[in-house]
Structures are given as C-alpha cells and as structure tokens.
Amino acid sequence: MRKIAIIDIGSNTIRMSLFNVDGDEFNELLNKKTTAGLASYVKKGFLSRDGIEKLLRILNGLIKTAKVLGFDEIKIFATASLRNILNIEEVKEILKREIDEPVEIVSGVDEAYFGYLGVKEKYDVSSGLIVDIGGGSTEITSIEAGKTVYNNSIPLGSLNLFKKYSSGIFIPKKSIGTAEKYVVKKFEPIYSENLKSDEVYGVGGTIRAVSNVIMEMKSLQSNKMIKSEFVFELYDKLKKKDKKTYEYVLKVSPERVHTIFPGTIILMEILRMSEAKTVYVSKFGVREGVLTNYLSEGRK
C-alpha cells in the first residue's frame, strides 16, 4: 500500500489530498484546504515577495504534515496561480531552493487533461464538456465517442474576474455589464469550435460552490446534478444581491462569497455557448487526475 500526498497550488486556495493507493485503486483519506489568496499578491503580473513567502510557509507546513502522517511520496503542482505570473522563473528557483519536494508548473492544456482523467474516475463519459472554473483560469475539454477531441485553457477565473472589476466584496452594479462583456470577449476565440453538448461535467471549487448554493436554494436532495436553468436563476439572484441567496452562500461556502458571482457569470457563458441542459458535478477533478497520471507514468 502506497501513501501519496497530492498538493495543488491554486490562485485562491492550496489543497492537499492524502491517498492510500493499491495498484490503480486509490482512496482519499484527508483533504486539507488552506486559503492562500495568491492572486491578491500579484501586482502588475509579478508575484510579490509577501506572496512568495506565504506560499513557502504554507507548502512547508503541508509537507511537514504529510510526512508526520507517513506520506513520504509527495507530488506538488501549480496551475494558473504560478504559470501566468511574469516572474515565474524567479519563483521556480526559490521553490527549488526552499522546498524539499519538486514543484511542477502544469500547462493549461495539461490541466484540462488532468481534469478529464479525474472525471473519468467517477463518470463513464462518452460525450460532453468537462469544465473546471478555477481562480485564475478556466479549462474546457470536449469529449466525443469517449475520446478527447478538444481541450483548452482560458486565462479567466472567478478570482481574477472579481479582482478586475471590484475593490470591495461585490462587483458594483455599474460594472456588471462590463464584466459580462469581458467574459464574452475571452471566450470568443473558442466559439468557432462548435462546443455544443447537452451535458457539462463540472470540476473544481467554483462549480461545487454554485451547486451547493443551488441545492439550498431549490431544496434539492443532492448537488450531483443541477439543471442549467437553475444556474441562470442563481445568477439573477446574485446580481440583485438577494439577501436570502447570500445567506445560502455564507452557509455552504463562506470563503467564496466574493467570487461566486464572477464564477457564475463564467459558468453561465459556458452554458450559453454549449447549450447544455444539465451540469453534473464531479467530486473528482484535477488532483485525482494528476494522481492517475502519476501512477500511469510509474508503470511505463
């Protein structure tokens, strides 16, 4: 039995998942989330010294925890949180010097692929779109006849959209229309790909938060499947700053009170583009995909 720790450096949170692994089978024993807010430390494209120090402090703490618990096999990766910064080479050198374990900077295309691998662990996906709305990017993978026919990473996430149009807790009413036009502009390059699908498979914290709020809002028994029309309804309520809806947000996902509306804008545009009727919310995502790929590489 192998004990493997997977650490995911995101734009908003840094997560560590601890897995027991037996051959190709794995079981998550612990999922630890730390809100780092690295995107807030990026100024004019550069991750600040304070941001780097916070990253080092959190990583060293998670590595120590993993090793104390007997997880000596550790895989660390970063997504848009680091790959989009201008001082990436400097940060890579600092990480190499200060962190005992290697840190892989995952490309947008690979991140989309890992999300697909994660979803495949839970769903038999023969066709559909796999969507991961992160803090700093959105990954989209199109599946046809059980095969990947398209994947892409758009440098737009719930946190950087929030940062662009808000200096408080909410995007001001006067800026909402401009923010929506910006989202449309970011997605325009992929409209020609004809990514139509009845089903979207959602990965990551933003879509899970949206589904959790909708479950409360609609008194659903589960958040594993939500109708697209519910997402549009949630958007309308968040746009109006409906008190009851934000009470639901504070109940189920308080750490996303500032980013759930930007995330919903992005998801809504994807649903418009794809004309999807249903969103399936996957418990497994990029971390599980990274683990699956890591195990596969070990067999080569």
Image (cartoon, rainbow, N blue to C red):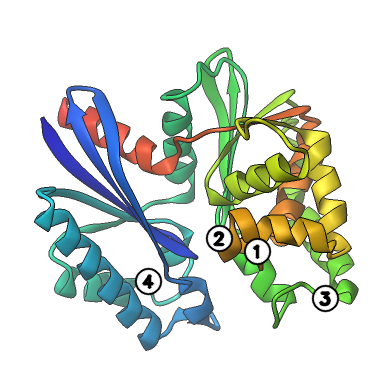
Residue that numbered label 3 is attached to: 172
**Coordinates of residue 82 in the picture (x, y in percent):** 41, 66
Comparing labels 3 and 4, the label whose residue is closer to the camera: 3
Q: Residue at x 9, y 49 (%)?
A: 70
Given residues 132 and 243, the one toward you in this image is 243
Q: Tell which residue pokes out farthest to the bottom in this image.
A: 49
Comparing labels 1 and 2, the label whose residue is closer to the camera: 1
**Coordinates of residue 29 in the picture (x, y in percent):** 27, 40
Residue that numbered label 1 is attached to: 259
Res. 4 image quadrant: top left
Contact, mark 3 vs mark 2 (Cβ under 8 Å): no
Residue that numbered label 2 is attached to: 135
Q: Which residue is drawn at 15% across and 40% down?
A: 3
Cα separation between marks 2 and 4: 18 Å
**Three-letter code, disc 4:** Ile
Residue that numbered label 4 is attached to: 88
Mark 1 secondary-structure assignment = loop
Comparing labels 2 and 4, the label whose residue is closer to the camera: 2
Q: Looking at the picture, does residue 153 appear above or below residue 80? A: above
**Three-letter code, disc 3:** Pro
Cα separation between marks 3 and 2: 19 Å
**Coordinates of residue 274 in the picture (x, y in percent):** 76, 33
